[in-house]
Image (tube, grey):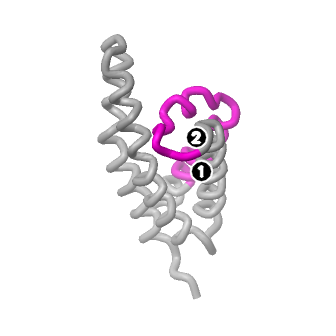
């Protein structure tokens, strides 16, 4: 795994984390209703999580663990993507297609994070 790939993953996480605070409404809309509390609280929490994961992956000493946690995070947010696809099923075709396209994208994201984890220098 190249240093470039690691930097790109850090950038993706940091950028996504920042947008949770800069433009939270779209994230609020996909928070599953089954979760307790307000959607905005979940949006902020997931934004903080993404920023923390970006920091962990950025630093060699925490990269392995941070990337493993990132893979778990990408898996954990999958229900929000399913909710978005379901909620957008009656929207115009381009929006519906975008919502459906997000679903299979989670798999390569998880695989990417796992590869970054495996390529990180062992601790010790």
Q: Residue at x 65, y 28 (%)?
A: 23
Percent position of residue 28, x then y: 57, 32
Q: Which residues are magenta?
A: 7-36
Marks 1 and 2 in Cβ contact (< 8 Å) = yes
Nearest the eye: 14 or 120: 14
Nearest the eye: 13 or 48: 48
Percent position of residue 78, x then y: 39, 46
The residue where tag 1 is placed is 50
Magenta segment main secondary structure: helix
Q: Residue at x 38, y 25 (%)?
A: 87
Nearest the eye: 28 or 116: 28
- Is 17 magenta? The answer is yes
The residue where tag 2 is placed is 16
Nearest the eye: 77 or 50: 77
Q: Quadrant of the N terminus?
A: bottom left
User: Does 44 sit above or below residue 114?
Assistant: above
Disc 1 is placed on an element classified as: helix
Q: Residue at x 53, y 59 (%)?
A: 3
User: Does 90 sit above or below residue 100?
Assistant: above
Q: Tell whether 57 sits left or right of 93.
A: right
Identify the residue at the far right of this view.
22
- The reply to whether residue 17 is visible in this rendering is no
């Amino acid at each position: 795994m190249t240093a470039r790939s690691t930097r790109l993953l850090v950038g993706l996480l940091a950028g996504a984390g920042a947008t949770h605070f800069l433009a939270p409404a779209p994230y609020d809309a996909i928070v599953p209703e089954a979760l307790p509390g307000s959607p905005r609280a979940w949006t902020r929490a997931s934004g903080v999580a993404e920023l923390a994961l970006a920091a962990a992956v950025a630093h060699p000493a925490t990269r392995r663990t941070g990337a493993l946690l990132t893979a778990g995070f990408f898996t954990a947010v999958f229900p929000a993507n399913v909710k978005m696809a379901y909620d957008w099923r009656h929207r115009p075709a381009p929006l519906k297609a975008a919502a459906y396209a997000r679903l299979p994208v989670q798999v390569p994201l998880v695989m990417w994070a796992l590869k970054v984890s495996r390529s990180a220098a062992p601790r010790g």
